[in-house]
Amino acid sequence: MGYEAEIRRAIAEKKTELEKDEQFFSSEYYFRFLRQYVTTALGKKAPKGRVELECFAERGTDRTAWTEGHTVHVNTRGPLIRDLSTRMLQHYSIIGHIVHECLHILLSDFQAMKGCVNGILQASWYETPKNPDAEQVLEDLRQKPLKRKLCASICKELINIHEDGFIENYGYVLFPGVFAAGIHVMDDQLFEKSAAVEDMLAGVKRGEVPFISTVMNCMLLDAMHYPEKSTGEALEDNETEELYDHLHDLLEACRPYTEALRWEQNGGERMRLI
């Protein structure tokens, strides 16, 4: 109890002090505390034995947390953590990232995800879409290697986005309290750091940003139950307004699938929807 109480007192400091924060969030003392959290979070739910937690603190990278299916890696000085205004918020964000990756280990079908991307690279379906044009799409991909690579890249990004939406829906139920609060802080920071749609579309018009990046950004916010981020200003011109209308037509066409992806528990079926 003494050890945990000391950690909690250190976290509860209201103001951040850069040098002290760097030392605290980089310490083996804090990392040991986080590893206990992983054990508490997963309990007996972890598939195939214990889940490992690798903690490190590095500012020179844009990666914050990830998993390959058995180990959770968390960078306690990641870009979605270190800029938060209080030590408590930084701690909650770290917990959110850890629980998010634990949820992937509990709920994501890594084999289906890999099979889906590899299938497109090989011009075959992992799960056949309920679409009369499905075979025609594959024939087109067989003849165009570059298009296969592009489609596989887009598919991989769609998987990441909608798996995140799916696992967090269940995460709020599985891990209430501080765990859910951590997920919420993490998502709030993601929203704060995302670009406004008007700015992204202006970049699309100037040829600086691919249109698909704007689509994916809006889909990610939607999967996290956040509205489209807007500047609240009028669109620059007719061309940008046409892009805006096109974006919303595309998002609405995808909505029956994106809504289903939030709640479909069968991993193979989620890949078919994607």
Image: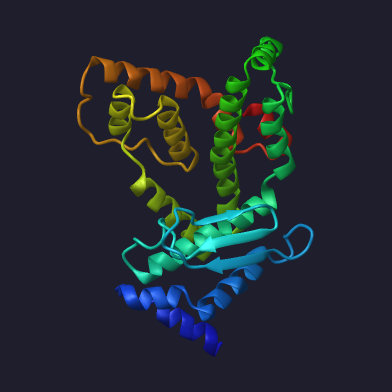
| Any part of residue 266 in sight | no
Q: Residue at x 60, y 27 (%)?
A: 149
Query: Is 2 placed above or below 32 here?
Result: below
Query: Is 230 placed above or below 106 here?
Result: above
Total numbered circles: 0
Give percent across and percent down for residue 204: 34, 25
Colour scheme: rainbow
Q: Which residue is drawn at 56% across and 71% down?
A: 34
- Name the residue nearer the viewer: 265 or 213: 213
Query: Is 248 placed above or below 70 here?
Result: above
Q: Which residue is drawn at 33% across and 68% down?
A: 86
| 204 lies left or right of 135 | left
Give percent across and percent down for residue 1: 56, 87
- Name the residue nearer the viewer: 243 or 230: 243
Give percent across and percent down for residue 97: 52, 58
Q: Residue at x 30, y 75 (%)?
A: 17
| 240 lies left or right of 178 | left
Q: Residue furthest bottom?
A: 2
Check the picture and name the quadrant holding the C terminus.
top right
Q: Quadrant of residue 111?
A: top right
Q: In which quarter of the image is residue 122?
A: top right
Give percent across and percent down for residue 65: 53, 56
| Any part of residue 110 in sight | yes
